[in-house]
Amino acid sequence: MKKNIIISFLITLLMSFRIFGFSNVNAAETAEVKTPKDTVGELKENGDIGTGTIDNAKQSEKKKVVILATGGTIAASGDEGKTTGYDPGVISAEELISSVPELKDVADIDAVQICNLNSDDMTDEIWIELANKINEMAKDPDITGFVITHGTDTMEETAYFLNLTVKTDKPVVLTGSMRPPTSLSADGPMNLYEAASVAASDEAYGKGVLIVLSDHIYSARSVTKTSTYSVDAISSGEMGSMGIVRDGRVFIYEEPVKLHTVSTEFDVSDIKELPKVSILYFCVDSDPGLLSYAADNSDGLVIAGAGAGEFSEEYKEIIGSLSIPVVISSRIDDGIIIPDNLLCENTVAADNLSPQKAAILLRLSLLNTTDNEKLQKIFTSY
Ligand code: ASP
């Protein structure tokens, strides 16, 4: 009995220290024991709170999240229990949402079916429609954030395009799945629940476009698909993830410093399509004739060079003679290409953007300029 009293006294003492340590309030005022919920509310009011401590699913007033569905494996249908050989983009936005009843604990949900396809069939027309729809809907003060359901194959490209073209600080979060809903242990429901939790959160406000998959929160700029089968199929490589989600709680520890969303110069409100950019992947004995063909049929090129953006003497000769903008990226996942690395003077260094992300930035930049010096400034800023 005595032992119990001493233990409960020690616990109360420890809780008082905890509250005092985190809230900056006078020790005398913290004498009563508070629940973690009370403490969070108080800290928020005092402005003393960092990111990642509010249980949005339970404590904030009801939010509204719009789910824009585009297809992918998360909306697929296949043989019962199997993880391969399914049809992506079959299930409607409404069906997807009703399969995760827990979403109602996170926010009121609206659904918009943008398209329903395998994300390898995504197009610039759909990107532009998506960006303009979000820009329009974001003006509605009742909407807290957006979730885009999408195939994982090209999710990083759509995310980066939106990161450069949506004009809102409200959270825009992409998610998908690696296993179809008809498989054993499908990952889509949890991914959708976590993406909605992030879209409804205060923590994700102003952080640029995000991807949520397998409990992790990634920045659109750095994320890439790294596995053809694993449920943990994407990664931001050496840049790391921005945060994690646990049972609807959002914890963000990093934020992007490169220009995004409301700070960009890109406006797609009046266009229907983007300039055409081709990506050439260099390898031993690459046919330089492909370069000439691509240059004749494109507005700009991106080279996925070896190492720090390098290629053969034959490649160098043709690239050096081209008059369309050429951006040099690398086939290596991690690392950076700076102007000092360039083998040809008439080219632009992609910084640490992957070839597929460099192509998106080049397509948008070509709406405004073809000048190499200006393009290099853009590639250094975004
Ligand atoms: N092929 C599918 C897609 O990108 C793969 C996926 O969703 O994971 O639509």
Image (cartoon, rainbow, N blue to C red):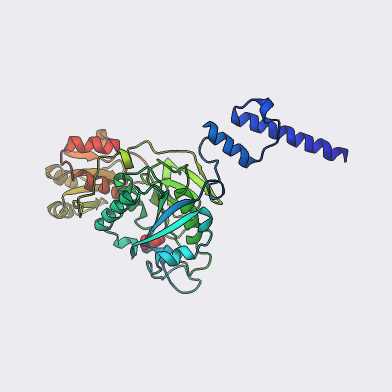
281 vs 8, nearest the viewer:
8
Q: Is residue 89 left or right of residue 20?
A: left
146 vs 310, nearest the viewer:
146
366 vs 322, nearest the viewer:
366
Q: Residue furthest right?
A: 1
Q: What x and y, as percent, mark residue 1?
A: 88, 41
- The quarter holding residue 164 reads top left
**Residue at left offset 24%, top offset 45%:** 267
For ligand 1, which image quadrant applies? bottom left
**Tally of numbered discs:** 0
32 vs 228, nearest the viewer:
32
Residue 304 shows in the view: no
- The quarter holding residue 111 reads bottom left
**Residue at left offset 46%, top offset 74%:** 79
Q: Is residue 291 left or right of residue 191?
A: left
**Residue at left offset 18%, top offset 42%:** 368
Q: What x and y, as percent, mark residue 64?
A: 44, 52
Q: What x and y, as percent, mark residue 159?
A: 35, 50
Residue 265 shows in the view: yes
Q: What x and y, as percent, mark residue 277?
A: 20, 51
Please state, as top left, top right, bottom left or bottom right, where the C terminus lies in the image: top left
- The quarter holding residue 153 reads bottom left
